[in-house]
Image (cartoon, helix red, strand yellow):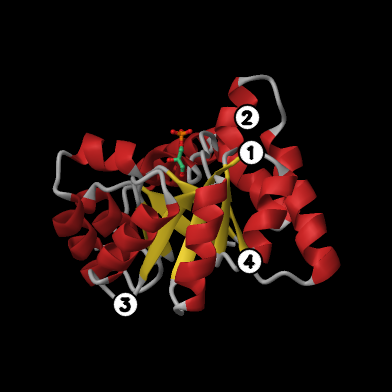
Amino acid sequence: MKFFVDTAEIDAIRELHALGMVDGVTTNPSLIMKSGRDIKEVTKEICDLVDGPVSAETVALDADGMIAEGRELAKIAENIAIKVPLTWAGLKACKVLTDEGRMVNVTLCFSANQALLAAKAGAAFISPFIGRLDDINLDGMELIHDIRVIYDNYGYETQILAASIRTVNHMTEAAKIGADVATAPPAVIKAMANHVLTDKGLDAFMADWAKTGQKIL
Ligand code: G3P
């Protein structure tokens, strides 16, 4: 499973990138707002750092506006994936931009039918929002599973980009189901390294090592 980082914080992306953990980056208007940065400037910085797809989201609500904004965002770098919402206008924009040879990430997906439409419209990525479904007592992972089955039934090449990931368990489950990509906040990716038995085992090793009186360096 590829890891995308769901943030516009350049320092956090740089730290994970240095460890080989970053196959791409996703941003959205809320993440740009949180970063306090200019969308074009920060997106360019991210694209200079990361080779994989970097999603930048349009904000127009009509198809023509999304297409124009998408073309403008795509000028930032070769690896821009234009993010459009899963509305009828977004699907129209997806088809036009895809036909121009651009990568499109269709976002705010909450149903398997929406994902089917995005694949038909040629999306490179579909972004089902797991956490926001869980928030309203629905099952975000069931949606990832349903999309996986449907895409595999018909050989759609649209990649399932599990989004709105909030926990380390979301990462495990998305990987088990076979999501192509998971995009997660940096804190979730870092938390995947944690295990209480690792900490406990390390404490015991350190205590025993101290008793030997030895040094390696
Ligand atoms: O990738 C979409 C993501 O940013 C949404 O996450 O936690 O705001 O639902 P969240």
For residue 99, which numbered disc appears in the image?
A: none
Residue 88 in the image, given as x and y percentages of width and height: 57, 48
For residue 78, which numbered disc appears in the image?
A: 3
For residue 110, which numbered disc appears in the image?
A: 1
Q: Residues within 10 Å of mark 1 (few under 14, many from 20)?
A: some
Q: Counting residues from the N terminus, which is met first, the one under dot 3 or under dot 2?
A: 3
Q: Residues within 10 Å of mark 2 (few under 14, many from 20)?
A: some
Q: Is residue 44 left or right of residue 103?
A: left
Q: Residues within 10 Å of mark 4 (few under 14, many from 20)?
A: many
Q: Quadrant of the N terminus?
A: bottom right
Q: Is residue 110 left or right of residue 94?
A: right
Q: Amino acid at mark 2?
A: Leu
Residue at image location 40% in from the left, 67% down from the top: 53
Res. 157 in view: yes
Q: Counting residues from the N terminus, which is met first, the one under dot 2 or under dot 1?
A: 1
Q: Counting residues from the N terminus, which is met first, the one under dot 3 or under dot 4?
A: 3
Q: Nearer the viewer, mark 2 or mark 1?
A: 1
Q: Amino acid at mark 1?
A: Phe
Residue 43 in the image, given as x and y percentages of width and height: 23, 59
- Mark 2: secondary structure: helix
- Mark 4: secondary structure: loop
- Mark 3: secondary structure: loop
Q: Quadrant of the C terminus?
A: bottom left
